[in-house]
Every structure is written in structure tokens, then in C-alpha cells.
Amino acid sequence: MIETKLFTSSQILPRDWDALVAHDIFLQTAYLKALEEAAPNNITLYYYGFYKEQELVGMAVMQRVKLYLNDMFRNEDDSCFKERFKNQVAKILKGNILVVGNLTHTGQHGMFFKSDILTNEEFMHSLLRAVDELKHEIKTVYKKTIRAILLKDYFTIDSIHETKNNLIQMGFHHVSVQPNMIMTIPEKWTNFNDYVADLHKKYRDRFKSARKKSNTIVSRELDETAVFELSETLYKLYKNVSNNAKINSFILPENHFYTFKKQLGNNFKVIAYYLQDELVGFYTLILNNNQLETYFLGYHSAYQYKYQLYLNMLYDMAEFGINYQYTSIVYARTAMEIKSSVGAKPEKMVMYLKHTNWFLNMILKYIFKLMNPSKKWQERHPFKSN
């Protein structure tokens, strides 16, 4: 018999929690505490522990997300027809959804269990029971109805797909989403010069051109004090990029980057770009064991094209990952083509999605396609060794 326990704060998670999830910083208490303190204002976090004979053998991170699609769609150039259509979609999906996983980061960072103790079927049965319990808890305590359930971000090889048929029978839709762009670092690359040497001439010339354009830009890692002092500017640069997204399900608060630096310390990097004395861009990294995870970034639009800020950030992320001997760099989704041009490969990802209204659930898959439109893009192959 598997027992479950709900925790409403990272402060009260059991002492053996971090030992269970030592492989993933996004499931550990330091990260969860940072996210709690600096979460988007429409996200509330919950945690479940799964016990067998009083031993913690599994866990899940869940997020209640207040979702209002009128705030998500940001394309002001839409026709009147598109605008009316999106308003109808907003009426269907507005309200609270429950996400098993992390809406603020790409990847499966929502659950883990000891596979030598539990079968996938046992864990998924307990997980879905916990979802139902949390739905009832939210209805009872907050008088809010969960409109939809999202099991978020799984690679095609993840064990959850062993229960795919059961999930579909329960009404979940198996939906494809934009791929996660990941660069696997070969052992032969001992430093960044090896990366550059492995580029085809076309891409090596592009690299040299980007570096030349940015030769007046100075990059500098910010410590905790500097992140605090520059919080307002960092936030404006982040919002400048975020506001240009056509669809965005959350906005980070201004204290986000400082809070993450304070809680994660050296495992959270903030790299700033200066033009003379002006902060014109930044990117962030999360050090996740042998994986380097790229995080949020921002830049000044007036300098982006002239100095190739975004492309140079991608190169700098690669340089950090290679020089510090990470096995892979997770570039996440969005901007797939330019990320593939620096060496990232698309890894297919899927989600499981269900609306709690049976009729709306019938059309939910098509609505999800509107929210997550497929993008035509050409994968690049920059390396000689490809």
C-alpha cells in the first residue's frame, strides 16, 4: 500500500527529500524554496511525498496555475476574426489548471520515484489519486475548481508512456509540444577551441563574425550583491524579451533573479553584458549536476542586432558548458533554428492534458494546438562530425 502526504511549503518537506532527488536540482528544496519566494503571481506550489512502509519512495511537484488566455496572447497585429476566436478560447480555458511539473522551465521536473521499489503503474496510480485529492483540497479551501490537468514535458523514452493507454482511457490527450533543444558535449571537446575547430567553415565564419560584432561588449558574472543592486534593470531587460512572446502563461516577478541567486548560490549564474558602462543584456544558468540548464535572459532591443547579443549568449553558454566539462547543455524550447545552428539538437517532448468537463475535453486537443502551434524551421548541422 502506497501512502501519500501533501506538503504546502518547501519549509516542511521531509529531511530525506533531497537525498531522493539528488539527481535533479529542480526537485530539491533550495530550488523549490527559491521558486516559492519568487514565483509568478499566478502560480502556487504543492508537493506530494509517496511512502511505502514509512519510507519516502517517490515525490511530485504540482502547481496550481491561474490561467487567463487574454493575458497570454500578445499579438497586437491579429485580425478581428483571430481576436474573437482567441476570446472564445479564453472563455473555455480560463480559471485554474493543475500542472504536474514546472510551468516555468522546460523538461520533466515534476516527479520521481524509486523504480526498484515501485512499478510505473503503481506510482502513476498513486500520483493520479493525489491529483484528485489536491483538486478536492483546492475546491474546499479556496473555493476554486480545477478546469484542466497537465502532466508536463516528457521525452519519448520516459517511463510514463508505459501507462499511455491507461491515461488515454482516463481522458488524457497525448499531445506533442515544441522540442527541447539539447547540445550533447562529446568527450573529445576538452575546451571551447575544440568546439570552434569542429564547426563547418560556414558556421565557423558565422561564429567569428558574431564575436567581431560584440568585441566592444564586456561580459561579467554578477555576484549576489550586484544582482540585488541591478534587479530593476535586469527585470526591464527580461520583460523586453518576454513581452515580445506571442504566448506567455506567466510573468516572473522583479525579485526572481535575486531570490534565485540568494537561494542557489553558485549553482545559479547571472552573466551580464556591458557596453561601456551600460547593462545591455544578461543570461542566466542553473548548474544541474552534469547538465547545464539555460534559464531566462534579457537584452536591450536597440543593441540586439548590431552586437548579435542573443547569438553570442548562445555561444557563451556553450563555452561555459564545454570548459566546465558538462555532459550536455539544455537550451530549452523556442528559437529552435538558431539554437540548432550553434549545435543543439531537437529532442521530442509530449504532454498529457485533460479538461475536467467531458465536452470541452473532446475539443481540448485542438485548442492546445492553437496555444502551442507547430513551427516550421530548418534544423542546422554545424559540425564536421555530424
Image: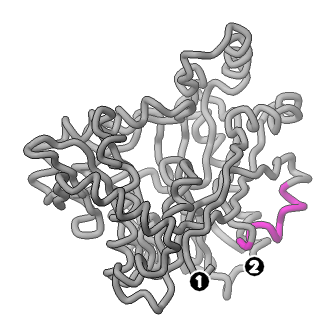
**Amino acid at the residue labelled 2:** Thr
**Amino acid at the residue labelled 1:** Ser
Q: Is residue 21 magenta?
A: no
When asked about the image quadrant of residue 137, the answer is top right
Q: Residue at x 10, y 44 (%)?
A: 229
The mark that comes first in sequence, 1 or 2, is 2
Q: Does residue 288 show up?
A: yes
Residue 65 at x, y percent in the picture: 54, 37
When asked about the image quadrant of residue 241, the answer is top left
Q: Is residue 165 magenta?
A: yes
Label 1, on which residue?
A: 385
Say which of 314 and 198 sits in front. 198
Q: Residue at x 53, y 68 (%)?
A: 343
Query: How much space separates mark 1 and mark 2, taking CA atoms?
Result: 40 Å
Residue 297 at x, y percent in the picture: 35, 48
Q: Residues within 10 Å of mark 2 (few under 14, many from 20)?
A: few
**Secondary element at image label 1:** loop
* Chain part drawn in magenta: 157-167
Q: Main secondary structure of the magenta part?
A: helix
Relative placement, left or right, of 370 versus 339 is right
Q: Residue at x 17, y 43 (%)?
A: 279
Relative placement, left or right, of 197 versus 164 is left
Residue 284 at x, y percent in the picture: 32, 56
Say which of 297 and 65 sits in front. 297
**Quadrant of the rendering where the C terminus is positioned:** bottom right
Label 2, on which residue?
A: 119
Relative placement, left or right, of 277 versus 245 is left
Relative placement, left or right, of 345 versus 34 is right
**Quadrant of the rendering where the N terminus is positioned:** bottom right
